[in-house]
Amino acid sequence: MSKQLLFTPTSVGPFTLKHRVVMAPLTRMRSSEGNVPNEMMAEYYAQRATPGGLIIAEATPVSPYGFGYAGAPGIFTQAQVEGWRKVVDAVHAKGGVIFLQLWHVGRQSHSLLQPGGIDPVAPSAIQAEGYAYAQSGAVPFGMPRALLLEEIPAIVEEFRHGAELAKSAGFDGVEIHGANGYLPDQFLQDGTNKRTDAYGGSIENRARFLLEITSAATLVWGPGRVGVRLSPSSSYGSMHDSDPEETFGYAAKALDTLGLAYLHIVEPRIKGDDTLDKDAAPVAVHYLRPLFSGPIIAAGGFNRESAEELLFQGDADMVAFGRAFIANPDLPRRLQENLPLNAYDRDTFYGGDAGGYTDYPFAAQQVSSE
Ligand SMILES: Cc1cc2nc3c(=O)[nH]c(=O)nc-3n(C[C@H](O)[C@H](O)[C@H](O)COP(=O)(O)O)c2cc1C
């Protein structure tokens, strides 16, 4: 019997949401020249917008040096602001709420993606395993250069500026991308941060960059329109920490003092299986829930049943869906009416045209049998 907690109202900052099915941030690499969002992106987001439903728009670099995926949209030029306005207006026209995810990939890049062909930056000069997506295709992550202490304030300022531009584009708020092994995560976890200055060593120091960029965004928006995404259990991008409970517990408690819109947690998944395994990693929403007093969004491998179960247990307030939202523009309706889901096509996830982007079918309207 369905509990349907997904379709009860909740709130995020000043917004009352009509349901708890959140669209997860999804990099699709379909922006136009100059990393400018376009009409096709506006159509894609509008298709997925619902009245009172929260969309977290894809990871968007705040700096030309923050890219690891060619074709990702940016938020550092006026042309990008104009492009994003089309997306935001299209979502608002359908009554949706849309936050923008602010991004800097740090070491998950390559000199081919950097202006002037310079090396990407990181807290420490440690190379990650994996691939960046240059115009020419996938390239192994490059060897990063360790940021000088005096360079860090300029990156914090880039996040503040990105937050400000997101506001002028009409977004409802921003999410700091602190997950998946990108720059803030590289500062946070001790496997990637070997610094001996004020940004390395103790957890207080390693969390400093994340807290500074989050605070910078709250100065622009007020805290109720800023969320943060963390992925305590993900090893993507060669990430590891010697004490994830301590590290992410500290981060959650410190973020809690800011009074944020929400904390967004990527949950552990069993490989090849879309069910949750609470024992797969020590740090998941179940552990973090008591440490953060605001709303929590959980993401990662959820289906209708496991999402309902998590809400029922009370470990999160909302559930974000990624791949299911790619393939199902009307995902909230399908979950509510328990309709079958379209399968996703992995080959069209990253880059390309409207194929696998705006052409996934909506479920047929139900014909009354009366
Ligand atoms: C194509 C694709 C692009 C993604 N892009 C982002 C992104 O821009 N930012 C982010 O935080 N996570 C990103 N993710 C991770 C998703 O937000 C989500 O956490 C992940 O897909 C697990 O959720 P799911 O099982 O519902 O798909 C991406 C995932 C996929 C498949």
Image (cartoon, rainbow, N blue to C red):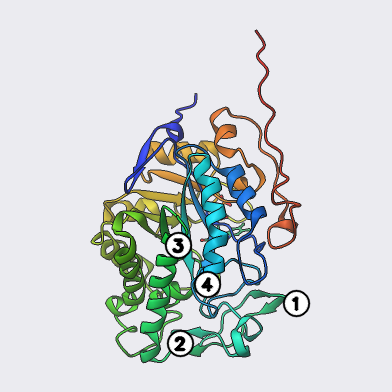
Using the rendered image of the protein, determine whether residue 74 is visible from the camera's viewpoint.
no
Mark 1 and 3 residues: CB-CB less than 8 Å, in contact?
A: no
* Helix, strand or loop at mark 2: loop
Q: Residues within 10 Å of mark 4 (few under 14, many from 20)?
A: some
Mark 3 and 2 residues: CB-CB less than 8 Å, in contact?
A: no
- In the picture of the structure, the residue carrying the numbered disc 3 is 166
Please identify the quarter of the rendering in which residue 177 is found.
bottom left
Q: Nearer the viewer, mark 1 or mark 3?
A: 3
Q: Nearer the viewer, mark 3 or mark 2?
A: 3
Residue 41's place in the image compared with 327, above or below, is: below
Amino acid on which the number 4 mark rests in the picture: Thr
Q: Position of residue 8 (x, y in %)?
A: 40, 32
Q: Left or right: 115 with respect to 297? A: right
* Furthest-left residue in this view: 257
- In the picture of the structure, the residue carrying the numbered disc 4 is 77
In the image, what residue occupies the spot 38% across and 34% down? 9
Q: Position of residue 302 (x, y in %)?
A: 53, 45
In the image, what residue occupies the spot 64% across and 75% down? 132
- In the picture of the structure, the residue carrying the numbered disc 1 is 136
Distance from Cα at disc 1 to Cα at disc 3? 29 Å
Please identify the quarter of the rendering in which residue 206 is found.
bottom left
Q: Residues within 10 Å of mark 2 (few under 14, many from 20)?
A: many
* Helix, strand or loop at mark 4: loop
Amino acid on which the number 3 mark rests in the picture: Ala
* Helix, strand or loop at mark 3: helix
Q: Position of residue 129 (x, y in %)?
A: 60, 78
Mark 2 and 1 residues: CB-CB less than 8 Å, in contact?
A: no
* Helix, strand or loop at mark 1: loop
Q: Which mark is residue 292?
A: none
- In the picture of the structure, the residue carrying the numbered disc 2 is 124
Distance from Cα at disc 3 to Cα at disc 2? 29 Å
